[in-house]
Image: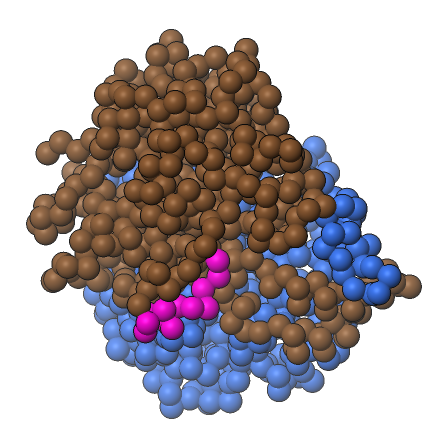
């Protein structure tokens, strides 16, 4: 293993409570809540009608003029990733082709991309418009009619909106990033794994800088129903969305869908230092494991989480006592929050634990990148975030939940991501850079 | 010091066989796995044929209780499980005791499961409001809650192949899935190699699985005009590097490899099949729909892999081409190989088994890696069939139409993804 150290030198959150490092940091500290009644489509007759929605988002504001026509082949997930990358690169101060094409100060062959993606939902209006053209006289969809004429009602590049590697692909093109580019597709653990892999890509000298993270939008009728059928959403807060998502609280009964994500600029520490970059934190370790129950849902015994935490500590050569704060995944689900809390308790004892899901909901593959952004901010701005809506810590969640914002020097943060189904777990450790 | 990574097991399910040996035998016989589509009614589609895995039954790979636990697997996850069972046995991991499952991980480049097509289409059409030209989401939701079910939805996620295999073998090490289109499983093998090299795991189950032979998958590729439309002669439709090529043929299946640190393999006395010696990964960063005209991303991936393996260009005995049989890929891949290898490009044989298997999309690279390992074992190169009319822009040695006995110690395998991800691995005969 090389001695290269990897630091975070840029943050690009795109979230229901703010876009950009400063807006997001302020919103996290003020406990702002971005969960509202869905306006992206009419949510009546859905059992859950609320979401962490990003209002007034225009992708074109984050895309160079010459590339704007490509926005029409971007699903919302891709748009969010592209915007997050733009925000992150600007925050870092590096000049890629997109920022200043005449003064690029990054070697494109040493600039990598690694973005976690979800199962991107088709735009049902676009698709059904085409499907409806293949309905026979008897009112039924005809596959024969679809194959012969119906498919022509879809734009030729239709498939490209939905391939999960397109989040990375567009970002590589916009920023001229020619080093390794990957797309991790592991549900809610995706961006943790993407950031962990990018960390190793720099450590093993395959790139000097990586734009890493994840993005997803589940605010789509199909995305919503999928999550609801799998029993993950709260139905009891349609009238008071801001109280809906309650990590570790005794009255939690599910999460809310959301959209958003973040890109983080990871950089070889020597390079970042030599250009006097603002260094938010260092990534020092990761651990990944797996566990599912008989339904392939997350294993509620939490052993996979405790193993991932132990491995992360081991890879960072740290002890449990060295961790000052945990940014948990805790999305407000009954069994999952409890399993996570118990695993944290078992390995890390009484460390303060925060979850930001009460503020933003759960945006799938984008959630881990926002958690890691929050962890980096906790170190650079010296605070423990409040776990919004955790009013009565559940007996099943025997951890030291941070229920109030605290100003405090934080030197090391462990973050946890896991996939609701599929069982991937990843823990990442960030440390103050010295 | 980085650790050496060896291959100790392999398995696959392809249109030419439900295991590696049968697939390999048919490849060497130059057989085509392509025929008219039966999975759905494609009779009116622009492309009416595909390379399907026929008569597949997961029960043939998993015994009673295991089958019950995994019977909800989607088509691609079923292929992944079957290939993993073969690879696991091939590596004799079923007989190994004292292996630490915390040190065994998985890294797949597996695809999503197919959409639950008929319920999805029927509820969408019923909820369409033709007057407003938009979906009535209130009506749609009522129907969706009745018609869709949690299991079918869950099994569509691209991480489920890895989940099924991990559950079957209780793998508790690093757990990843990447989906970089047609490059995915080569990228997975490369990244799995890195995890072992850097000490994060001792054994990795890797490879990929995919099936896009479903009504929307074929729709998507037909709209992109990426597929061959040679409907009068499916068996010869996949014509890599041939002047008459007109697109790729969509296929399905899985390829799984067991990678292991040299130390771990030796310790348990495993039979070592070959070594993963090098990995190169790049992005084109050019256009969403086109490959860079000079093939720079592919060239760079090959150069990085060669450097990573510590070999020289002249050591390479065989190139497993990405060779999809699209006009652009084959022309530009040929150029990229020339740019990477110079004059040597004309001397090193390069073939595409997609001529027989079609294009397994995310799983393609894993099956091609298996072909490289078996080429090293048997000292024979698989052919490019249907390669009959020379294309002036494809003027390398594509091992046309017949397999060829040759000295094979070092193979370079390319996979290039739609969207610009390029991955190359170097597979080498193992010498201690």
> Could you tell me what secondary structure mostly forms the magenta stretch?
helix
Residue occupying the point 42% across, 78% down: A337
Q: How many marks?
A: 0
Q: How far across and how far down the image is residue B287, in percent?
A: 61, 32
Q: Quadrant of residue A294?
A: bottom left
Which region shows up in magenta?
B64-75
Residue B369: x and y in percent read 34, 37
Q: Is residue B40 left or right of residue A65?
A: left
Q: Residue at x 21, y 65 (%)?
A: A319
Percent of width and height locating residue A77: 61, 54
Which one is in front, B371 or B331?
B371
Give the residue displayed 84% in from the left and 65% down from the top: A138
**Chain B pictured colour:** brown
**Is residue B67 shown in magenta?**
yes
What is the quadrant of the C terminus of chain B in the image? top left
* B57 vs A231: above or below: above
Which chain is depicted blue?
A: A
Q: Is residue B275 visible?
A: yes
Residue B162 in sight here: no
């Amino acid at each position: 293993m090389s001695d290269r150290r990897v630091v975070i030198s840029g943050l690009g959150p795109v979230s229901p409570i703010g876009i950009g490092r400063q807006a997001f940091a302020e919103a996290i500290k003020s406990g702002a809540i971005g969960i509202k009644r869905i306006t992206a489509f009419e949510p009546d007759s859905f059992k859950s009608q609320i979401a962490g929605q990003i209002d007034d988002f225009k992708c074109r504001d984050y895309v160079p003029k010459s590339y704007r026509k490509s926005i029409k082949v971007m699903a919302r997930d891709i748009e969010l990733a592209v915007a997050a990358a733009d925000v992150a690169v600007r925050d870092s101060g590096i000049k890629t082709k997109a920022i200043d094409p005449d003064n690029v100060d990054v070697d494109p062959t040493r600039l990598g991309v690694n973005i976690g993606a979800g199962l991107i939902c088709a735009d049902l209006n676009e698709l059904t418009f085409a499907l409806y053209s293949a309905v026979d006289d008897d009112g039924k969809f005809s596959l024969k009619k679809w194959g012969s004429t119906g498919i022509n009602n879809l734009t030729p590049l239709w498939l490209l909106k939905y391939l999960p590697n397109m989040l990375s692909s567009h970002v590589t093109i916009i920023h001229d990033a020619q080093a390794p580019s990957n797309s991790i597709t592991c549900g809610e653990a995706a961006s943790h794994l993407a950031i962990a892999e990018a960390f190793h890509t720099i450590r093993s000298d395959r790139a000097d800088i990586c734009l890493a993270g994840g993005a997803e939008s589940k605010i789509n009728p199909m995305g919503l129903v999928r999550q609801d059928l799998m029993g993950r959403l709260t139905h009891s807060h349609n009238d008071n969305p801001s109280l809906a998502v309650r990590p570790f609280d005794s009255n939690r009964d599910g999460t809310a869908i959301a959209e958003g994500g973040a890109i983080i600029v990871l950089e070889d520490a020597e390079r970042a230092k030599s250009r006097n970059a603002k260094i938010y934190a260092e990534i020092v370790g990761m651990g990944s494991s797996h566990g599912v129950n008989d339904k392939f849902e997350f294993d509620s015994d939490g052993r996979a989480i405790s193993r991932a935490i132990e491995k992360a500590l081991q890879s960072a050569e740290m002890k449990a006592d060295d961790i000052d704060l945990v940014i948990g995944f805790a999305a407000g689900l009954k069994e999952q929050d409890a399993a996570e809390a118990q695993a944290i308790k078992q390995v890390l004892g009484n460390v303060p634990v925060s979850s930001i899901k009460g503020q933003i909901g759960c945006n799938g593959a984008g959630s881990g990148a926002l958690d890691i952004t929050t962890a980096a901010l906790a170190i650079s701005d010296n605070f423990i975030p409040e776990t919004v809506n955790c009013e009565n810590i559940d007996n099943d969640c025997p951890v030291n939940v941070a229920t109030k914002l605290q100003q405090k020097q934080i030197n090391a943060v462990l973050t946890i991501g896991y996939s609701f189904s599929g069982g991937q777990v990843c823990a990442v450790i960030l440390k103050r850079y010295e | 010091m980085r650790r050496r990574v060896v291959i100790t097991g392999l398995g696959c399910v392809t249109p030419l066989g439900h295991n590696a040996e049968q697939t390999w035998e048919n490849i060497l016989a130059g057989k085509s796995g392509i025929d008219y589509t039966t999975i759905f009614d494609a009779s009116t589609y622009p492309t009416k044929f595909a390379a399907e895995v026929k008569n597949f039954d997961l029960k043939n790979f998993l015994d009673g209780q295991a089958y019950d636990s995994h019977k909800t697997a989607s088509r691609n996850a079923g292929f992944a499980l079957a290939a993993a069972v073969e690879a696991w046995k091939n590596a004799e991991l079923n007989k190994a005791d004292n292996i630490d499952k915390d040190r065994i991980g998985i890294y797949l480049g597996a695809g999503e499961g197919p959409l639950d097509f008929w319920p999805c289409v029927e509820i969408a059409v019923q909820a369409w409001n033709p007057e407003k030209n938009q979906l009535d989401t209130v009506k749609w939701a009522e129907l969706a809650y009745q018609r869709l079910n949690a299991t079918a939805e869950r099994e569509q996620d691209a991480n489920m192949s890895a989940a099924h295999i991990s559950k079957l073998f209780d793998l508790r090490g690093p757990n990843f899935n990447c989906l970089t289109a047609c490059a995915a499983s080569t990228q997975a093998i490369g990244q799995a190699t890195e995890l072992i090299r850097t000490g994060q795991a001792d054994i990795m189950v890797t490879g990929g699985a995919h099936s896009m032979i479903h009504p929307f998958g074929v729709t998507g590729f037909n709209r992109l005009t990426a597929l061959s439309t040679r409907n009068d002669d499916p068996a010869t439709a996949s014509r890599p590097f041939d002047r008459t090529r007109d697109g790729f043929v969509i296929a399905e299946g899985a390829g799984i490899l067991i990678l292991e640190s040299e130390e771990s393999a030796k310790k348990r006395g495993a039979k070592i099949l070959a070594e993963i010696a090098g990995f190169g990964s790049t992005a084109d960063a050019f256009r969403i729909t086109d490959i860079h005209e000079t093939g720079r991303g592919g060239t760079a991936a090959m150069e990085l892999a060669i450097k990573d393996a510590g070999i020289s260009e002249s050591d390479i005995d065989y190139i497993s081409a990405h060779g999809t049989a699209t006009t652009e890929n084959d022309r530009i891949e040929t150029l990229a190989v020339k740019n990477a290898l110079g004059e040597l490009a004309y001397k090193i044989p390069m073939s595409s088994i997609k001529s027989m298997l079609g294009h397994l999309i995310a799983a393609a690279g894993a099956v091609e890696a298996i072909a490289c390992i078996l080429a090293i074992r048997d000292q024979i190169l698989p052919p490019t069939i249907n390669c009959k009319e020379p294309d002036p822009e494809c003027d390398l040695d594509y091992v046309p139409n017949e397999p060829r006995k040759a000295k094979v110690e070092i193979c370079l395998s390319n996979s290039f993804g739609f969207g610009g991800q390029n991955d190359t691995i170097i597979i080498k005969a193992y010498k201690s």
